[in-house]
Image (spheres, grey):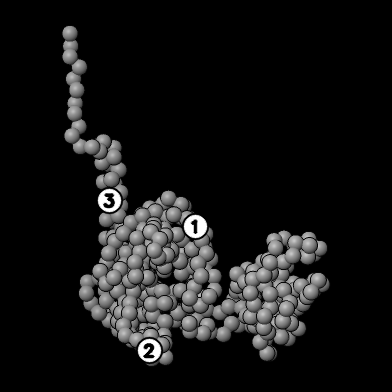
């Protein structure tokens, strides 16, 4: 009788598992080799007027071969001096082209030869579960690579200026202080996000500004040095409407913006808004809160007349308003 032949595998991993891990490792290594030379370390000397002292820093990456660098606004905002260190150790003086605290993005430029730029990808094609790689300088450990997946899409994140950043990428690729401004990269070596924040002490909840937002903001900063946004000149807070009032006026949702103050000579002042009014619509769309109002007050809204839906006591009004350009945000 033939005895069955038994083959023992000493490795706990099956060949298919080993192949998968090898492929994953190869992908991460190839991404690091492709994008790593474009990643920079940024050291900043704070200006006296900023209220901060000493030196700080973060990460960034070259996105054009002629020296333009994307990073976070909170890394370089109001800096007296910016020093950029390239992957190979070369150091250059950086010039702040512009920063946008509303999206926590900034553009810095250096003048240097033989620069390697990282390509910007299309963040709209991301899917939850997709592998991503973060490269940066956490805690001063330069050019550190971490990998993870896209945990979620379409998140909202509050910037330091108070404005809501829409469509933020959530990832579990480890980020730490110093990673700010570094690239979040897909498996093809394309930058699909700019790392911006981590929730402490939570583990694996990190955020990046999508590349499409970064591309739009970078173009505006290079062209104009700032980003234009609409402004109507009210101070307000989110408020919940009484259900009877919402039903009476056929309003979807139960929120609005309670006007707490109207700035003199502002578009809201000229439109006749008063303290105690509740803004519930703009341009034919519904406004359920301050964040909805921020979303519609874009550059396209500046100088264009629109209908503002307002509740004044129990009466619903529509007033004509022409948003102006938002003044620069005040430093926190």
- Left or right? Give the position of 320 relative to 98: right
Residue toward you, 25 or 293: 293
Residue position for label 2: 47
Do labels 3 and 1 touch, CB within 8 Å?
Answer: no
How much space separates mark 3 and mark 1, taking CA atoms?
Answer: 25 Å
Kindly indicate the quadrant of the structure image that contains residue 36: bottom left
How much space separates mark 1 and mark 2, taking CA atoms?
Answer: 36 Å
Which residue lies at the image location 22% right of the left edge and 74% below the top edge? 89
Q: Which callout, 1 or 2, points at the residue further toward the start of the chain?
A: 2
Residue position for label 1: 153
Residue toward you, 138 or 31: 138
Which residue lies at the image location 50% right of the left edge and 67% below the top edge? 157
Which residue lies at the image location 81% right of the left edge and 71% below the top edge? 314
Counting from the top left corner in percent of width and height, residue 327 is at 57, 85
Counting from the top left corner in percent of width and height, residue 172 is at 39, 57
* Residue 18 position (above or below residue 264): above
Q: Is mark 1 on a helix, strand or loop?
A: strand
How much space separates mark 2 and mark 3, taking CA atoms?
Answer: 43 Å
């Amino acid at each position: 009788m033939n005895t069955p032949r038994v083959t023992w595998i000493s490795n706990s991993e099956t060949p298919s598992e080993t192949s998968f891990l090898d492929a994953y490792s190869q992908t991460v290594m190839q991404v690091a080799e492709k994008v790593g030379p474009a990643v920079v370390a940024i050291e900043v000397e704070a200006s006296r007027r900023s209220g901060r002292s000493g030196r700080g820093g973060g990460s960034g990456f070259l996105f054009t071969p002629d020296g333009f660098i994307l990073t976070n606004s909170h890394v370089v905002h109001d800096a007296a001096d910016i020093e950029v260190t390239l992957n190979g150790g070369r150091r250059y003086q950086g010039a702040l082209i512009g920063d946008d605290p509303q999206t926590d993005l900034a553009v810095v430029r250096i003048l240097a030869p033989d620069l390697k730029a990282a390509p910007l990808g299309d963040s709209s094609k991301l899917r939850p579960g997709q592998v991503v790689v973060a490269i940066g300088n956490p805690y001063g450990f330069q050019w550190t690579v971490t990998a993870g997946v896209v945990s979620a899409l379409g998140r909202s994140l509050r910037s330091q200026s108070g404005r809501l950043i829409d469509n933020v990428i959530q990832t579990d690729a480890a980020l730490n202080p110093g990673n700010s401004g570094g690239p979040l990269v897909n498996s093809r070596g394309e930058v699909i996000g700019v790392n911006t924040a981590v929730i402490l002490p939570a583990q694996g909840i990190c955020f990046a500004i999508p590349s499409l937002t970064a591309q739009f903001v970078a173009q505006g900063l290079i062209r104009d040095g700032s980003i234009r946004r609409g402004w109507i000149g009210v101070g307000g807070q989110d408020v919940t409407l009484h259900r009877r009032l919402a039903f009476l006026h056929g309003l979807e949702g139960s929120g609005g913006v309670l006007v707490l103050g109207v700035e003199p000579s502002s578009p809201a002042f000229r439109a006749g808004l008063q303290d105690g009014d509740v803004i519930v619509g703009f341009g034919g769309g519904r406004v359920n809160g301050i964040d909805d109002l921020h979303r519609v007050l874009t550059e396209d809204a500046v100088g264009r007349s629109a209908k503002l839906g307002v509740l004044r006591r129990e009466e619903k009004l529509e007033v004509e308003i022409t948003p102006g350009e938002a003044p620069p945000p005040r430093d926190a």
